[in-house]
Image (cartoon, rainbow, N blue to C red):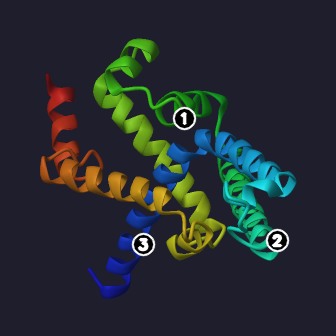
Amino acid sequence: MKNNEILEDMERETLGTWVKTMLTIYPTLPNIIKVIDSIVELRATNLTSAYTSSGQLKYSSYDQVDRVIKMMERKSKMLRIHDFVCDLIKPLKKEELRFLKLRFFTRMRIEKLVEVTGISTRSVYRKAHHIVSKLTSILSVRGITSRDIEDMVKGEHWIYAQYDKHASEKKTNFLKGRNFTGRMAEETSMKEQVC
Protein backbone atom coordinates (compact mmCIF):
# COMPACT_ATOMS: atom_id res chain seq x y z
CA MET A 1 0.00 0.00 0.00
CA LYS A 2 1.20 3.45 -0.79
CA ASN A 3 1.41 6.16 1.85
CA ASN A 4 -1.53 8.06 0.33
CA GLU A 5 -3.70 4.94 0.44
CA ILE A 6 -2.74 4.31 4.06
CA LEU A 7 -3.60 7.91 4.98
CA GLU A 8 -6.92 7.66 3.12
CA ASP A 9 -7.76 4.43 4.97
CA MET A 10 -6.86 6.02 8.30
CA GLU A 11 -9.02 9.06 7.50
CA ARG A 12 -11.92 6.82 6.49
CA GLU A 13 -11.65 4.83 9.74
CA THR A 14 -11.47 8.02 11.81
CA LEU A 15 -14.38 9.55 9.93
CA GLY A 16 -16.38 6.35 10.44
CA THR A 17 -15.75 6.55 14.17
CA TRP A 18 -16.94 10.16 14.13
CA VAL A 19 -20.09 9.06 12.29
CA LYS A 20 -20.85 6.53 15.05
CA THR A 21 -20.15 9.19 17.65
CA MET A 22 -22.45 11.74 16.05
CA LEU A 23 -25.23 9.17 15.70
CA THR A 24 -24.86 8.19 19.34
CA ILE A 25 -24.94 11.74 20.73
CA TYR A 26 -27.71 12.96 18.42
CA PRO A 27 -30.67 11.92 20.63
CA THR A 28 -29.23 13.79 23.64
CA LEU A 29 -28.85 17.11 21.83
CA PRO A 30 -32.46 18.37 22.21
CA ASN A 31 -32.28 17.82 25.99
CA ILE A 32 -28.93 19.60 26.21
CA ILE A 33 -30.38 22.52 24.25
CA LYS A 34 -33.37 22.69 26.64
CA VAL A 35 -31.07 22.68 29.67
CA ILE A 36 -28.96 25.46 28.16
CA ASP A 37 -32.13 27.49 27.51
CA SER A 38 -33.15 27.04 31.15
CA ILE A 39 -29.74 28.11 32.43
CA VAL A 40 -29.69 31.15 30.14
CA GLU A 41 -33.16 32.17 31.22
CA LEU A 42 -32.26 31.77 34.88
CA ARG A 43 -29.03 33.75 34.57
CA ALA A 44 -30.52 36.46 32.42
CA THR A 45 -33.56 37.03 34.60
CA ASN A 46 -32.28 36.27 38.09
CA LEU A 47 -29.53 38.70 38.90
CA THR A 48 -29.98 38.06 42.62
CA SER A 49 -27.99 34.86 42.17
CA ALA A 50 -25.00 37.11 41.48
CA TYR A 51 -24.95 37.97 45.19
CA THR A 52 -23.87 35.94 48.20
CA SER A 53 -26.22 35.39 51.14
CA SER A 54 -24.53 38.32 52.90
CA GLY A 55 -25.32 40.61 49.97
CA GLN A 56 -21.81 40.82 48.52
CA LEU A 57 -21.43 40.73 44.76
CA LYS A 58 -20.13 37.32 43.55
CA TYR A 59 -19.62 38.50 40.00
CA SER A 60 -20.42 41.60 38.03
CA SER A 61 -23.23 42.08 35.53
CA TYR A 62 -20.59 41.90 32.81
CA ASP A 63 -19.56 38.47 34.08
CA GLN A 64 -23.21 37.42 34.10
CA VAL A 65 -23.71 38.66 30.53
CA ASP A 66 -20.50 36.94 29.44
CA ARG A 67 -21.75 33.64 30.90
CA VAL A 68 -25.06 34.02 29.08
CA ILE A 69 -23.24 34.71 25.80
CA LYS A 70 -21.04 31.63 26.26
CA MET A 71 -24.09 29.48 26.94
CA MET A 72 -25.81 30.83 23.83
CA GLU A 73 -22.69 30.03 21.79
CA ARG A 74 -22.77 26.51 23.18
CA LYS A 75 -26.45 26.21 22.28
CA SER A 76 -25.62 27.33 18.73
CA LYS A 77 -22.95 24.64 18.55
CA MET A 78 -25.40 21.96 19.71
CA LEU A 79 -27.93 23.15 17.11
CA ARG A 80 -25.26 23.00 14.37
CA ILE A 81 -24.35 19.44 15.38
CA HIS A 82 -28.03 18.46 15.44
CA ASP A 83 -28.61 19.95 11.99
CA PHE A 84 -25.42 18.30 10.71
CA VAL A 85 -26.67 14.84 11.72
CA CYS A 86 -30.19 15.53 10.37
CA ASP A 87 -28.70 16.50 7.02
CA LEU A 88 -26.34 13.51 7.04
CA ILE A 89 -29.05 10.88 7.52
CA LYS A 90 -31.51 12.35 4.99
CA PRO A 91 -30.25 10.21 2.06
CA LEU A 92 -30.89 6.95 3.94
CA LYS A 93 -33.71 4.65 2.87
CA LYS A 94 -36.61 4.17 5.29
CA GLU A 95 -35.42 0.70 6.28
CA GLU A 96 -31.88 1.98 6.92
CA LEU A 97 -33.21 4.91 8.94
CA ARG A 98 -35.39 2.60 11.04
CA PHE A 99 -32.42 0.35 11.76
CA LEU A 100 -30.18 3.35 12.50
CA LYS A 101 -32.69 4.70 15.02
CA LEU A 102 -32.89 1.36 16.79
CA ARG A 103 -29.13 0.76 16.87
CA PHE A 104 -27.74 4.22 17.50
CA PHE A 105 -30.49 6.53 18.74
CA THR A 106 -32.06 4.11 21.22
CA ARG A 107 -28.75 2.23 21.68
CA MET A 108 -30.53 -1.07 21.35
CA ARG A 109 -28.29 -4.02 22.15
CA ILE A 110 -27.37 -6.45 19.39
CA GLU A 111 -29.34 -9.31 20.96
CA LYS A 112 -32.49 -7.20 21.09
CA LEU A 113 -31.94 -6.00 17.49
CA VAL A 114 -31.73 -9.62 16.36
CA GLU A 115 -35.04 -10.28 18.09
CA VAL A 116 -36.77 -7.13 16.79
CA THR A 117 -35.53 -7.31 13.19
CA GLY A 118 -35.59 -11.08 12.81
CA ILE A 119 -32.14 -11.18 11.21
CA SER A 120 -29.00 -12.96 12.38
CA THR A 121 -26.41 -11.42 14.68
CA ARG A 122 -23.90 -11.28 11.84
CA SER A 123 -26.47 -9.50 9.64
CA VAL A 124 -27.09 -6.93 12.36
CA TYR A 125 -23.37 -6.16 12.54
CA ARG A 126 -23.13 -6.02 8.76
CA LYS A 127 -26.15 -3.75 8.45
CA ALA A 128 -24.78 -1.36 11.09
CA HIS A 129 -21.41 -1.36 9.34
CA HIS A 130 -23.06 -0.76 5.97
CA ILE A 131 -24.99 2.27 7.27
CA VAL A 132 -21.90 3.77 8.92
CA SER A 133 -19.89 3.17 5.73
CA LYS A 134 -22.62 4.77 3.63
CA LEU A 135 -22.73 7.85 5.87
CA THR A 136 -18.93 8.02 5.90
CA SER A 137 -18.95 7.96 2.10
CA ILE A 138 -21.55 10.72 2.02
CA LEU A 139 -19.29 12.89 4.18
CA SER A 140 -16.29 12.11 1.98
CA VAL A 141 -18.19 13.05 -1.17
CA ARG A 142 -19.24 16.31 0.52
CA GLY A 143 -15.59 17.00 1.31
CA ILE A 144 -16.08 16.79 5.07
CA THR A 145 -13.10 15.40 6.95
CA SER A 146 -12.57 14.17 10.48
CA ARG A 147 -10.79 17.46 11.18
CA ASP A 148 -13.98 19.35 10.20
CA ILE A 149 -15.97 17.34 12.71
CA GLU A 150 -13.31 17.82 15.39
CA ASP A 151 -13.56 21.58 14.81
CA MET A 152 -17.36 21.40 15.05
CA VAL A 153 -17.27 19.69 18.47
CA LYS A 154 -14.25 21.54 19.83
CA GLY A 155 -14.43 22.02 23.59
CA GLU A 156 -17.17 19.43 24.10
CA HIS A 157 -15.26 16.88 26.15
CA TRP A 158 -18.29 14.61 26.56
CA ILE A 159 -18.41 14.18 22.77
CA TYR A 160 -14.69 13.35 22.66
CA ALA A 161 -15.29 10.79 25.42
CA GLN A 162 -17.97 9.16 23.27
CA TYR A 163 -15.58 9.19 20.29
CA ASP A 164 -12.88 7.55 22.41
CA LYS A 165 -15.37 4.87 23.49
CA HIS A 166 -16.20 4.03 19.86
CA ALA A 167 -12.53 4.07 18.85
CA SER A 168 -11.68 1.76 21.75
CA GLU A 169 -14.53 -0.63 20.85
CA LYS A 170 -13.31 -0.75 17.26
CA LYS A 171 -9.77 -1.55 18.39
CA THR A 172 -11.00 -4.21 20.86
CA ASN A 173 -13.23 -5.84 18.24
CA PHE A 174 -10.40 -5.86 15.75
CA LEU A 175 -8.01 -7.44 18.24
CA LYS A 176 -10.64 -10.06 19.12
CA GLY A 177 -11.04 -10.92 15.45
CA ARG A 178 -14.42 -9.27 15.02
CA ASN A 179 -13.35 -7.21 12.05
CA PHE A 180 -16.51 -7.77 9.99
CA THR A 181 -15.11 -5.90 7.03
CA GLY A 182 -11.77 -7.65 6.85
CA ARG A 183 -10.50 -10.94 5.58
CA MET A 184 -11.62 -12.94 8.59
CA ALA A 185 -15.23 -11.92 7.97
CA GLU A 186 -14.96 -12.95 4.33
CA GLU A 187 -13.55 -16.34 5.30
CA THR A 188 -16.31 -16.84 7.86
CA SER A 189 -18.92 -15.83 5.32
CA MET A 190 -17.53 -18.35 2.84
CA LYS A 191 -17.69 -21.08 5.50
CA GLU A 192 -21.32 -20.20 6.23
CA GLN A 193 -22.17 -20.50 2.52
CA VAL A 194 -20.62 -23.94 2.35
CA CYS A 195 -22.44 -25.28 5.43
Q: How many marks?
A: 3
Task: Return the residue nearer the eye: 70 or 100.
Answer: 70
- Specify which label sits upstream in the sequence, 2 or 1: 2
Residue under the point 81% across and 76% down: 62
Task: Return the residue nearer the eye: 49 or 95.
Answer: 49
Kind of residue at disc 2:
Ser
Name the residue that disc number 1 marks: 105
59 left or right, relative to 140: right
* Element under disc 1: helix
Residue under the point 78% across and 68% down: 69
Q: Position of residue 173 (x, y in %)?
A: 21, 47
Q: For the view shown, which residue lies furthest in the bottom direction?
A: 3
Name the residue that disc number 2 marks: 61
Give neighbour class at mark 1: few <14, some 14-19, many 20+ (Cα, 10 Å): some
- Specify which label sits upstream in the sequence, 1 or 3: 3
The disc placed on residue 11 is 3
Q: For the view shown, which residue lies furthest in the front direction?
A: 54
User: Does residue 134 sit above or below 70 in this rendering?
Assistant: above
Task: Return the residue nearer the eye: 106 or 35.
Answer: 35
Quarter of the figure with the C terminus: top left
Residue under the point 52% across and 58% down: 136
Give neighbour class at mark 2: few <14, some 14-19, many 20+ (Cα, 10 Å): few
194 left or right, relative to 7: left
